[in-house]
Image (cartoon, rainbow, N blue to C red):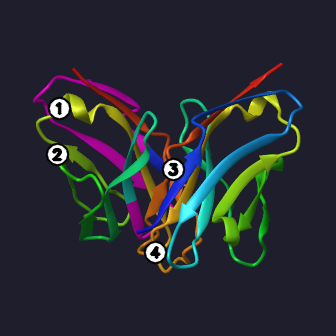
Amino acid sequence: AQSVTQLGSHVSVSEGALVLLRCNYSSSVPPYLFWYVQYPNQGLQLLLKYTSAATLVKGINGFEAEFKKSETSFHLTKPSAHMSDAAEYFCAVNSGGYNKLIFGAGTRLAVHP
Amino acid sequence: NAGVTQTPKFRILKIGQSMTLQCAQDMNHNYMYWYRQDPGMGLKLIYYSVGAGITDKGEVPNGYNVSRSTTEDFPLRLELAAPSQTSVYFCASAPLGANLNTEAFFGQGTRLTVV
């Protein structure tokens, strides 16, 4: 069975600092991985997705993620945090049938001045 | 363009009451889903549908029912509401024949409290 684990339910960074949100997956087949962001009182919005065309994936708002098969990881990074990045971030994997998604528990990112 | 629309946005139910959460999409997507989000638990799949008249259970279907009479609408029915159903509910959709890395589109959510 496929699963994703997000390390750290809360991450706090200073404005301008590096953002690193961790996601590890478990899959017996090549995984299809996603990062979604949820701003307060809103639905989920796609940040980026792994397509197997490249291991480094660029998304919206300056975020990127690197797929590392040897480490079964798909960590999300942004070089310089902005106050508007404060949100909850979810890593997800496609379960393989009808695009049903399996989500990690989420990481809430706080950005302080 | 509206995308995925959920109503209501908020609702308080008493134990034992029933209600229907509405979901509509205007993207002509065949796949639709209902997830619930609980703090620290991520999102869990309740039910999904691959087209009009076809539905199936997800990970946490107990206490819920769904129907899909049209491509656009996918309502979620709660019978005999229980405090354990207090949650935020998200409806999502995706296009038919999608690759496994195709994006799902989410509604704004319905925050339900059962007291």
In primary-sequence order, the first of circles 2 and 1 is: 2
Q: Can residue A82 be seen in this view?
A: yes
Identify the residue under disc 1: B82
Q: Which mark is residue A104?
A: 3
Image position of B72 with respect to A70: above or below: above
Question: Height in image: A97 above or below A35?
Answer: below
Q: Which residue is drawn at 61% across and 50% down?
A: A36
**Residue B10: x %, y % from top left:** 37, 28
Q: Nearer the viewer, mark 1 or mark 3?
A: 3
Residues beneath discs 3 and 4 located on the same chain: yes
Q: Decide: marks 2, 1 in contact (CB < 8 A)? A: yes
**Magenta includes B21?**
yes
Q: Name the residue under label 4.
A: A96
> Which residue is pictured at 11% across the width and 36% down the height?
B80
Instruction: Count neighbours of disc 3 (C-alpha within 10 A) and say few if under 14, some if 14 to 19, many if 20 or more.
Output: many
Whether residue B52 sits left or right of residue B14 in the image: it is right
Residue found at x 47% / y 69%: A99
Q: Mark 2 lies on which chain?
A: B
User: Mark 3 falls within which chain?
Assistant: A
Look at the numbered disc 3 and give the secondary structure of its residue.
Answer: loop
> Whole-percent x and y of residue A73?
66, 61
- Residue in the foreground of this view, choosing between A18 and A82: A18
For label 2, the SS is loop
Tell me the kind of residue under disc 3.
Gly
> Hey, which quadrant is residue A10 in on the image?
top right
Label 3 to label 2: alpha-carbon separation: 23 Å
State the SS at label 1: loop
Tell me the number on the disc at residue B63.
Answer: 2
Q: Does the magenta stretch include residue B47?
A: no
Q: Residue furthest front?
A: A70
